Amino acid sequence: MKFRVVALQAGTDHSKDGNPGLDANIALFERMAEEAAAKRPDLIVFPGYAITGWSYPLSNVMNGVAESIPGDGPWYQRYVALARKIGCPILGWLVDRDGGRYYNASFLLSAQGEFLGKYRKIHANLGIILGHPKIQAGAGLPHVGPIPLWVILLCATIRRCSSRAI
């Protein structure tokens, strides 16, 4: 059985004159996801920092996109609306806010926009290395039914776990 994944990437032209901003960043990926959905993949994967842009956004930017996952926040709801519009499961990215704790997180939505699960990055490089004091490390690896585990891991977690079985 084949599992077809489309991984979205902005490329260097998008930010050649600096970060164009939150709305421009997510709008680019929404357009890319709409185009990719025409090929009927099993999953469309948004990159980490899809909304904030790379590299290493300031604390106020990261804190500003923090929302509860799942939740009613505007960024999360944009992902939900997009999954419903294109009829394809989406692996999205946000800063997950849980009380006073923040997590660098990926989350999985069904083609109907239903929440299926989330993963809080266990290697919290934003908080530990770069001084984003609210960003915490997650507690463990995700379990999301039929979706392959590696699909919902974030980059540094894969490196951290590469020396042990995942």
Image (tube, rainbow, N blue to C red):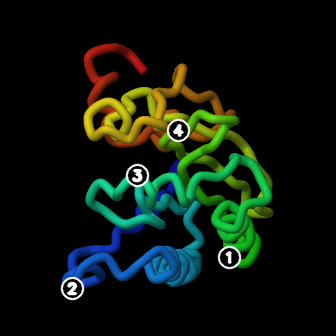
Relative to 57, residue 121 above or below: above
Q: Are marks 1 and 3 in contact (CB under 8 Å)?
A: no
Amino acid at the residue labelled 3: Ser
Q: Earlier in the sequence, mark 1 or mark 2?
A: 2
Give the residue at mark 1: 86
Q: Which SS class for mark 4?
A: strand
Return the residue at label 3.
59
Q: Residue at x 52, y 51 (%)?
A: 3
Mark 1, Cα crowd under 10 Å, few <14 / some 14-19 / many 20+, is many
Looking at the rendered image, the quarter that the C terminus falls into is top left
The image shows residue 83, relative to residue 55, as above or below, that is: below
Q: Earlier in the sequence, mark 2 or mark 3?
A: 2
Q: Is residue 119 left or right of residue 86?
A: left
Horizontal and vertical percent position of residue 23: 51, 80
Residue drawn at point x = 67 percent, y = 60 percent: 76
Residue corresponding to mark 2: 17
Q: Rounded to the nearest whole Å, what is the CA distance between mark 1 and mark 3? A: 32 Å
Look at discs 1 and 2 and give the one toward the viewer: 2
